[in-house]
Image (cartoon, rainbow, N blue to C red):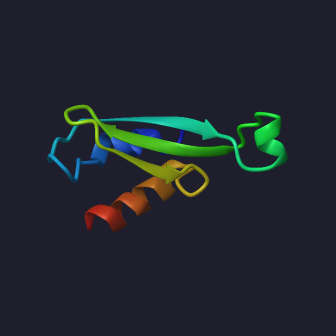
Amino acid sequence: MGGEKAFEARWVCPKCGAPNPRARRIAVTGAGLSRLLNWQHIEYVAVSCKRCGYTELYDAEVVGDERKAMGILDLILGG
């Protein structure tokens, strides 16, 4: 799971101000051979507002663990 729980605990929607997001990991294909083989090797954490639907994507490698996710949230939220 990794950083998803950190986002759900601290993320506030920048559009409507709602404090209750939904975070989940998504995988996508790249270009070239990985796309041809449908090899989904690129992962993101998608954080969506449950009220308005606004969604932000974060690179799962960067926020792969709780400590990194908390550091990124501190940068974003200034806390």
Please give the name of the residue rendered at 22% of the width and 53% of the height, measured from the top-left corner.
Answer: 14
Q: Nearer the viewer, residue 29 or 14?
A: 29
In the rendered image, the vertical position of residue 24 relative to residue 16, given as above or below: above
User: In terms of image quadrants, where is residue 43?
Assistant: top right
**Residue at the left extreme, as displayed:** 17
Q: Quadrant of the N terminus?
A: top right
In the image, taking residue 52 as reference, residue 31 lies left or right, namely right
Please give the name of the residue rendered at 26% of the width and 68% of the height, measured from the top-left corner.
Answer: 78
Q: Nearer the viewer, residue 4 or 14?
A: 14
Point out residue 65 in the picture as x, y percentages from the top left corner: 55, 49
Q: Nearer the viewer, residue 61 or 49?
A: 49
Point out residue 19 in the picture as x, y percentages from the top left corner: 20, 41
Please give the name of the residue rendered at 76% of the width and 41% of the height, measured from the top-left corner.
Answer: 35
Q: Is residue 66 visible?
A: yes
Q: Quadrant of the C terminus?
A: bottom left
User: In terms of image quadrants, where is residue 40?
Assistant: top right
In the image, taking residue 29 as reference, residue 32 lies left or right, namely right
Point out residue 59 in the picture as x, y percentages from the top left corner: 55, 53
In the rendered image, the vertical position of residue 77 relative to residue 25, given as above or below: below
Q: Nearer the viewer, residue 76 or 46?
A: 46
In the image, taking residue 67 as reference, residue 9 lies left or right, namely left
Q: Is residue 79 visible?
A: no
Please give the name of the residue rendered at 82% of the width and 35% of the height, measured from the top-left corner.
Answer: 37
Point out residue 3 in the picture as x, y percentages from the top left corner: 48, 45
In the image, taking residue 24 as reference, residue 56 lies left or right, namely left
Give the mark count.
Answer: 0
